[in-house]
Amino acid sequence: MKSYLDLLKLLPKSNCGECGFQSCLLFALKVFNNEVSPEKCPYLPLENIPQEFSGKGLTFNQHLDNLNLREIFRNLNDFPERARNLGCFINSEQRIVQLPYLDLKIQIFYEERGNPQALKTLSGELPDPRDEILICNYFIFNGKIPLSGQFVGLETFSHCTSKLKTLSRYAEEPLAEILSDHSLNIEKGLSAFEVNEFTQSSSGISFLIKVLPKIFLKVHFWYGEEEENLPPSCKILYDREALSYLDLECLVFCAERFVERLREKFI
């Protein structure tokens, strides 16, 4: 794409505002400048968008600049207290915070005054930039409302219209495809994650997976009925208080990332 006008041609040009901007023209400009993800438009055919605009090619520093997270995260001088509140393990002597993230173990070093520094996996590798953004947001939000233990669909939350399609396309649909593949050892694949309440019946599978210490996904999968032309389907639920810990975009990404990491177990 040579200019934002090429991108504008793919947009509905209805100026519906579901992306958060007043016009499709402004949205095209923002996407072309890598200031916003094209996924924010629920009507944009993402398969026609070049990789350069997917957001996944940006560096961590570029992401943080775009989302205004770098300064906020690095200036959290109460980082150890936040980590304790968010269910993390704290090694005060070495000034390290450790937390589980899906099938990874993350450690974050912090200064004597309490400001967080580098994020690494337990093996010393840098996490995917998208994962770092999610984890930064987790600490910035610093949710203080106790989890309810009640799980609801994404549609329960306000202003979720544009995210429902993303959740379905990049998490629920591919997860249904994985769970319906009888050639895969699903329980073995899930064993890499912290999974609770796993149940399996003739109609489907359900389980609870921990993404972060206080972020959980409740998965319900149905095998479907071939005779009644009902395909396999999946529904992902969130704790009713999940928005106290992350925003909608991050909550949807939690589900997307879980599916990505699960799929990798079968490659």
Image: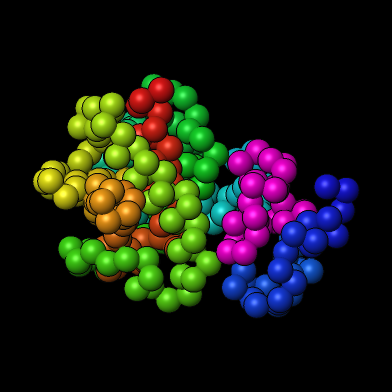
Query: In this orientation, does residue 55 appear?
Result: yes
User: Relative to 203, does residue 264 appear above or below in the rendering?
Assistant: above
Give how far across and how far down residue 216 sits, in percent.
Answer: 27, 52
Q: Is residue 175 magenta?
A: no
The quadrant the C terminus occupies is: top left
> Looking at the image, which residue is at 52% across and 43% down?
130
Instruction: Give the camera-side residue of 142 and 100.
Output: 100
Give how far across and how far down residue 141 sits, in percent.
Answer: 41, 61
Residue projecting furthest to the right: 2
Q: Is residue 54 magenta?
A: yes
Q: Give the residues drawn in magenta, as a range.
A: 31-57
User: Relative to 132, does residue 72 appear above or below in the rendering?
Assistant: below
Relative to 155, 57 lies left or right: right
Relative to 79, 187 lies left or right: left
> Looking at the image, which residue is at 19% across and 46% down?
205
> Looking at the image, which residue is at 43% across and 37% down?
260
> Looking at the image, which residue is at 48% across and 33% down?
127
